[in-house]
Image (cartoon, rainbow, N blue to C red):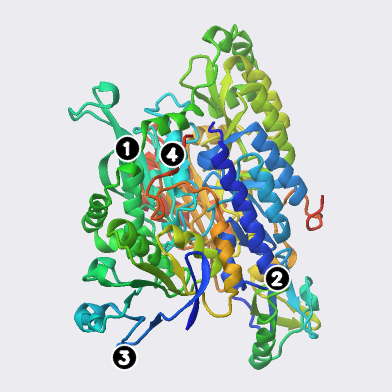
Amino acid sequence: MATPKGTHFVITANILGSGAPAYRRQDGSWSTNLQDAHPAADEAERDRMLADAASEEADIADPYAFPVRLDGPTIDPLSAREEIRAKGPTVPYRRPDAAQGAH
Amino acid sequence: MKVVVKDKRVVEDAWHVVKDDEAAGAHTIVSLARWNDHREELLAGGTPIGMVLRSNESPDDVRDRDRLALIAVDFPAFTDGRGYSTARMLRSRLHYKGEIRAIGDVMRDEMFLMSRCGIDSFAVKPGKDIDKALSAFDDFSVTYQAAADDERPLFRRVHR
Amino acid sequence: MYQYDEYDQKIVEERARQFRGQVQRRVDGEVTENEFKPLRLQNGLYMQLHAYMLRVAIPYGVLSSKQIRMLAHIARRYDRGYGHITTRQNIQYNWPSLEDVPSILDDLASVQMHAIQTSGNCIRNITSDPFAGVAPDELEDPRPYCELLRQWSTFHPEFAFLPRKFKIAVTGTPGHDRAAIRFHDIGVRIVENADGAPGRDGAKTRRGFEVWVGGGMGRTPFIGVVVRPFVEYEDLLAYLESILRVYNLHGRRDNKFKARIKILVSELGAEAFTRLVEEDFERSRNPDLKLERTELERVAVGFAPPPYEPVAIARGDGKTLAERSANDEAFARWLKTNVLSHKIDGYRIVVLSLKKQGIPPGDVSDTQLDRMADLADRYSFGEVRTMHTQNMVLPDVREAHLSEIYDELVALDMATPNFRLLTDIIACPGLDYCALANARSIPLSLELSRRFEDLDYQEDIGPCSIKISGCINACGHHHVGNIGILGINKNGEEVYQLMLGGHDSDSASLGRILGPALPENQVADAVEKVLAHYLKFRTDSEETFLDCYRRLGPEPFKQAAYGA
């Protein structure tokens, strides 16, 4: 089954410190929760948000945009890659609840 | 005048690259083709002349190498590592005694490696703090392998 | 193993300090991400899907118990309690934070370890035979040469920015390559030359190196070519340096997917390439680059044989072993698959399987590492090895200790009796972790491991390697699996391409695609049908899957997998 078409775009990057995936909110701040992302409605808004993100190298690295589908209020990341990025590995590992840098 | 790192100090000097259709005089750095074809004319002025080797050009192709006061080795992107071999061949294999200068995408973090390859001056790229760049030469106090700065591997320099 | 002297130690400490400075400059904004990226890659630090990933070097796969305890500590303190053994004998951590990495490097340096050049367009970890120094069929221990090459390649100033990554492997067993040298950018084979010229100390034969170039997997897999059948041992560094120089100057830099040395060799032709290398080698005749006997001996000291017990002690009375083998089927099975012969009478090589069903292949927990260190101290002169097949090894175990070690390993989930069998699967991290991947590989490996868990069935099949990669970069070595599987993304769906007949040792071969890619839920069935065909049509139980495939060709297997 082919991927359903995207209706919007989400801007994402990796948080510089933890490397965790982050999603850009409407106010320009970053959340680690995909559902907090502001879905850009068209390419112009996407490009504007991306340009803003690109200038924020102090906090994040490698910003890019990816297509999503809005399903009511829920953001569907569409691709397996972005779904895994948002939800974590689909396979078992030792301490999935370990906070970043927990000792 | 340009500010560069030379002999591990920040200095000013007049070396600059000129295009093939620009006048060449004292402290100008010309292209390989221009030097090879017109070196007698260029040297006739009696002033120091330099030449640049682009990353796809070979030091073997330079005629009358030793009459050049300076050879610039271009790093079009700092990830293009051909200049390291070029500099090392110039220094170690061809025994070039003049100044070898790194130009192009030159930054602090590559300068230690460049100096090991025989490069003795650095046109640090604009926007980078050139005084801070001097700390690059202290990156490592021990090196393993032979290079242009010392063609003996560590095991020949010290007793291990 | 090799012990660092003050010079080795200083280098890793200064490197850790250098990286601390580079991280600070990144955090302070003095360097951009683009400027920082190659620097952090040269310290083995990747940005992956969920977090950074740090790849720690395990030079030629050798570890001391002290080092293993540190790896356990790092997993516990800075990560999520586990690490992953890679197909280049290294270990990867999937969850470090950027600001912790300098401290991790300091900790590693304190036990003579580092993450130097485990990524980036530079010379990577020198890998080798995991049974180096203990295999009965070995000509000469390759590890001293590996260590010399490690030092030579570490921060080699001329080769820090190559067109692409560069991988070197060394084998000391000319008749049985366990280091896959034909699939490396440079492969080195220790050989003996009886051409009449006297060897060292007047020996009748000379030892030297057969040098291969241009092997590799990835988008365009190649089996390497021999560039020189005999390099004198003292010319090893100089000759390799000439190969690197030719690559540095002439390797393609216009296209990332055509930048490996294998492409250069292919495009120039082996003859023209060899000529360039020989010319450079001739011209750079630097007597100082010749390998000094005293230096080789200095390094080799660390790899001298440990104080083996005489066979009577090592073997014990042999009764426990015999009795238990006769009465304990599980133990007997493990003995048969995971315990290998050793060059010293009374000793064995013990493979520690990291392929327990339900665990991603190659993953190892902090507890396992800590306990493994204890086992190494108690039973194996304090040494452990990593394998590029993602298992680990206790290289020097007395036969008299096998029974008690088995019980320890069972308790640690490291006694799965499947070494070289069907469920000894190699898989890259895949789309669950890796930013380069197109498809997941671990779930498929877990499914296949479940499907084929029956040990009698696996034993009947005999040696058969399954290797899974989640993208064309082939970190799972799928091109050289007897059964290779490549995960690809087709219109948003993960599908899997099967290939058969790959082999990474002496009679090397690249796997051939069997047929159209399959959705994940059809792969296990297809593999089972392929195996059923093998079982039905092999000449006898001695004919391996690989030999049977080579004899029958792909057609009947394709029919079996895809046919009605």
Nearer-the-camera pick, C249 or C555: C249
Q: Nearer the viewer, mark 4 or mark 2?
A: 4
| Relative to C373, residue A35 above or below | below
Residue of label 3: B23
Specify whether disc 3 shares its chain with disc 4. Answer: yes
- Image quarter of residue A80: bottom right
Characterize the local packing of mark 1: few (<14), some (14-19) or many (20 or more) Cα atoms within 10 angstroms.
Answer: some
Task: Give coordinates of residue A101: x percent, y percent.
Answer: 78, 55
Q: In the rendered view, does C538 fall on the left or right side of C127?
A: left
Characterize the local packing of mark 4: few (<14), some (14-19) or many (20 or more) Cα atoms within 10 angstroms.
Answer: some
Residue of label 2: C28
Nearer-the-camera pick, C219 or C14: C14
| Relative to A11, residue B8 above or below | above
Mark 4 is on which residue type?
Phe
Q: Of the numbered discs in the image, which one, if any, rests on residue C234?
A: 1
- Image quarter of residue C219: bottom left
- The residue shown at (67%, 82%) is A55
Alpha carbons under labels 4 and 1: distance apart: 14 Å
Q: Nearer the viewer, mark 4 or mark 1?
A: 4
Alpha carbons under labels 3 and 2: distance apart: 43 Å
Alpha carbons under labels 4 and 2: distance apart: 39 Å
Q: Using the rendered image of the protein, determine whether residue B119 is visible from the camera's viewpoint.
A: yes
| Relative to C513, residue C65 above or below | above
Mark 2 is on which residue type?
Asp
| Relative to C68, residue C20 above or below | below
Q: Under tag 1, what secondary structure?
A: helix
Mark 3 is on which residue type?
Ala
Query: Do the residues bearing badges 4 and 2 touch, measured as CB atoms within 8 Å?
Result: no
Residue of label 4: B155
Q: Under tag 4, what secondary structure?
A: helix
